[in-house]
Image (spheres, rainbow, N blue to C red):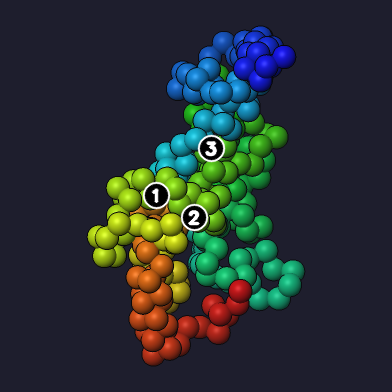
Amino acid sequence: MKMSETRDLANKRALARLTKALPGIFPAPVLAHALARRWTPPMPRLAVDSYWRKHPLRADRLARALAARSGTPSGWTWRLKEGRKNELPASFRSPPAPFRENAFARGPGFCCVCGQPVYRLGWHVDLWDRGPNKNAVWHTACVTAWRLWNAPSDYAKLIRRLQGRRCAETGARLWKTSEVDHRVPLFQVWREHRDAKWPALLSFWGLPNLQIINRDAHVEKCAIEAVSRRRVPVAPDATAG
């Protein structure tokens, strides 16, 4: 059997499973995406996951918008880990996440990234009028956004295309050795913006602060940042990681 025939057979079976499992209400863009895939996802939850993986920038915008809806929890401040058993991030390079801290976690049915209720299939809107899903602590979109914030280099191809394959620093053509960079370096975010409201802080990890630049420009930018970093010492606990 040819590969195309194998795929067609697998997709036929997957479509039958997906159709059978679909709830009466299902996000139309997700379904359209699922049916257009080379390999059809066999279950609704897989279709939702595939949709957000395909649209990480939408996930980034949505996660930050949901965080803005939650706002900064009362009494929360951006802090780093002190000791091995502390659940706080070890480095300022990790995005602040108050709802992942034990003191501010909202428990099952609420996203540990944005703090908003999680509904059926990891969706962010209660399309089914069933209330929060008590078995979930992540929005599917927030999972993708969290991956982008922590590993932006995995999305270099997408960001490169958004920039028209031009270096954000020099305007020259991007080479294969180009690298993802934070416009405002994260050590500077920790040093100068740590008292900002939490939802605003997330933009420093999201697309607004990401760019692709050629390696030589990146080396030069890092050298300038290193000089600046030495001039104004960073708090001792911020050097971890």
Mark 2 belongs to which amino acid? Pro
Front residue (pair 166, 53): 166
In x, y percent, where is residue 66? 45, 43
What residue sits 47% from the left and 41% below the top?
56
User: Which of the 4 quarters of the picture holds residue 236?
Assistant: bottom right
Kindly state the secondary structure of the residue where label 2 is placed: helix
208 above or below 225? above
Mark 3 belongs to which amino acid? Arg
Q: Earlier in the sequence, mark 3 or mark 1?
A: 3
Q: Which residue sits furthest right?
A: 85
Quadrant where the C terminus lies?
A: bottom right
- Label count reads 3
Q: Which mark is residue 152?
A: 2
User: Which of the 4 quarters of the picture holds residue 108?
Assistant: top right
Front residue (pair 132, 29): 29
**Disc 1 target residue:** 159
Check whether the beta carbons of the residues at disc 3 and disc 1 lie within 8 A of each other: no
What residue sits 39% from the left and 90% below the top?
231
Whether residue 36 is visible:
yes
Kindly state the secondary structure of the residue where label 1 is placed: helix
Q: Which residue sits furthest bottom?
A: 231
Check whether the beta carbons of the residues at disc 1 and disc 2 lie within 8 A of each other: yes
Whether residue 232 is visible:
no
**Disc 3 target residue:** 53
Q: Which mark is residue 223?
A: none
In x, y percent, where is residue 165? 33, 51
